[in-house]
Image (cartoon, rainbow, N blue to C red):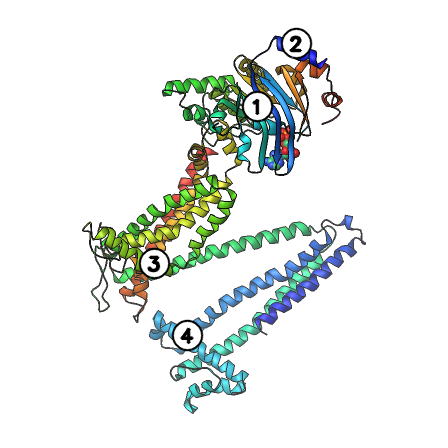
Amino acid sequence: MYDTQVTERAVDSKKIKFQCRNVQVYYGSTHAIKDVNVDIEDKTVTAFIGPSGCGKSTFLRCLNRMNDTIDSCRVEGDINLDGKNIYDHDVDPVQLRAKVGMVFQKPNPFPKSIYDNVAYGPKIHGMARNKAELDEIVEKSLRRAALWDEVKDRLDTPGTGLSGGQQQRLCIARAVATAPEVLLMDEPCSALDPIATAQVEELIDELKQRYSVVIVTHSMQQAARVSQRTAFFHLGDLVEFDDTDTIFTNPHDPRTESYISGRIG
Amino acid sequence: MSVALLFGLVIVLACVGYLIGRYRAIASVGGDMRGLHSLPSFYGWHVFLFTTVPSLLFLALWLLAQPLVLERSLSEFFPSDRFDSPTERTLLLADVRRVAEGLDKAVDQGILTESRAVSLRTEFGSVRDRLAEAGVALGSDVTPEVLRAAQDYRKRSAAGAVIRTALTLLIAGAGFAFSIYATGPALRARSRVETVILVLLALASTVAILTTVGIVLSMLSESLRFFSMYPWQDFFFGLTWSPNFRGNSELGLLPLLWGTLYISLVAMIVAVPLGLFTAIYLAEYAGPRTRSVVKPMIEVIAGIPTVVFGLFALVTVGPFLRDAFAEPLGLGSSASSVMTAGIVIGILNIPFVSSLSDDIINAVPQAMRDGSYGLGATKSETVRQVLLPAALPGIVGAILLAGSRAIGETMIVTMGAGAAARLDLNPFEAMTTITVKIVSQLTGDTEFDSPETLVAFALGMTLFVITLGLNILALAIVRRYREQYE
Ligand SMILES: Nc1ncnc2c1ncn2[C@@H]1O[C@H](COP(=O)(O)OP(=O)(O)OP(=O)(O)O)[C@@H](O)[C@H]1O
Ligand SMILES: [Mg+2]
């Protein structure tokens, strides 16, 4: 039955963006990710779900080599982006991260103005030729993150002065502004009210037209609403990875079933 | 009763009070602690603090006040013209105190009886010899007035000691009794203890403030005396510094101020970039192993005595700068120079800037770095655009601290820049600073009330105002920055 689904999917096969094979992650001697194989498709939203501490953030951070900044962290296995192993020596993590953007679990705006927060990436990567273009990028990004109306009159006030939910949307705008090919979002809505959540989900839907989005979430409903593919992690193992519909209606593994019906986690 | 004994007695009383307070609290609810407002030990502490704090504070105040009061009362023994001149009064009082101490010792050792000590007169033989027997050496023989004053001083301090003991014990006893009487289930011992602790902490902080105020006031009074002898315009705007102990000095501040600022500027030009770059390297680029070796090694610099740095300036840096730059460039042939002292002070200050800035950069949350790296920024972009702005207030503080150290440095300037006060732009010329001149005006056998000596206080005051200004500036910068980013 599993096989048939693979072939079914192969029919409307989209380009594979990330191909991960036998990925292991260690923090010192803790084995945080155990032998994970995942394919993340282009123009698709992939959701990572699983109980707290199962390694969702850890795996997400492997995809743009953010784990490099943690001294004790070691990554093994192959992670290919467009067929190129991102852990190869000739890959520049800085360029990789420009292509694979990230929104973190906790909002972390810079102690700069709202405008400068959003303009940070575009400025670094030379995406705007002049101030007008930069203004346009900033406005567009803030609109897409559903924050423009709230902040358009105070773009020069500090980003750290916004509310928690606004800060998170600012971080989303900041990530979107660099026009990444893949956007990794670690629980982007955990600090947002239902309205802002709906707006961010709308944004994810829109991004999906052009980019690939990976989202970690603790909300089953959100995973079901926004994603096409869902991966269920448990204690560092990838238990099940399938079409979202299948995961939520007809899971194969008993652990997946217990989790989505609320019995573990 | 000696002060130490008195102190011990109060503490013992307080400890007994602790036990009684605790016991009474437990007894008052029949052993059921839930009926008490606070834990039993708080009732104990309540008694302890009420016994010790007021009585010991009183004791401390008394000990501070007694000598002042006694000294004032000695004026009747001396002609008023001698007692009114501050220099002479200090000498007289020192004499009186030494003689009084000598008499105390002689009585202790049985050389004099108490009644002899009281009735002793210079007319009946040398007091000096008697005191020498007791091991108290006096420079000259004791004059009748001093002896009379010393005897009076002894009498009064003895009386003072009795009153002191009685009052201290009375206050301790009153606190003890009052707090034990108040002990009961409804007494909010915990909140009272909290209040007392608050007051104690606040008092501790006032000590530092009062000391500063005291320093400023004493400097100010001496400075005012200086300005009463020397016109302030000539001091603040004078272009020549040539003190002359036979009078007719020219005491112009400007050459010294110029030397101070010039040398500090050179020092900061050396210390700030090097220190800051070191800090950035250590905080962001170096691995944990490099860091654990390099950081302590840099901090060793801070532990080297400045006189050693002075030697380094004198024998190594000075001659090198002269041979390599000053002479070939035709800028003079002096080994002592602004450059020499400035560079060496700068090196001395590197660890201050680097160590403080390193801690501050490290304190910027990891999430800031993650955010920046996650957008594809390189390390140096992250440092420049995120970490340094976030750490700026602290770094400004570190730099200003190093600045005040550079301004206050004395030894390296003496050995590296010389002692010649000069107004010159040439950095390879010998110059000198305010601090060096403060030292040289006060050392040597000079009267304490000539303008040549008192100018040291005016110079000190100027230095104080400069560093105060620097600090206020730092606070203003930090505050403006905070408003912008918080
Ligand atoms: N920096 C680190 N150093 C050491 N261990 C870590 C580190 N970060 C995470 N871990 C460990 O790795 C495991 C996976 O953590 P991770 O943050 O990926 O969980 P998560 O699935 O994102 O959880 P949550 O839903 O609570 O965010 C946990 O056991 C955690 O303790
Ligand atoms: Mg997580």
Residue A22, x across and y down, in percent = 62, 26
Of the two numbered discs 1 and 2 on the same chain, state the one appearing first in sequence: 2
What is the chain identity of the residue bearing mark 1? A
Q: Residue at x 43, y 56 (%)?
A: B213
- Three-letter residue code for mark 4: Leu
Instruction: Say which of A145 and B64 sits in front.
Output: A145
> Of all residues shown, which one is farthest toward the left?
B330
- Which residue lies under the disc numbered 3? B312
Residue A252 horizontal side relative to residue B434, left or right: right
- Which residue lies under the disc numbered 1? A185
Quadrant location of the N terminus of chain B in the rendered image: bottom right
- Can residue A148 be seen by looking at this rendering? no
- Can residue B234 be seen by looking at this rendering? yes
CA gap, disc 2 and disc 4: 107 Å
CA gap, disc 1 and disc 2: 28 Å
Residue behind label 2 places its C-beta within 8 angstroms of ligand 1: no
Tell me whether marks 4 and 1 sit on the same chain: no
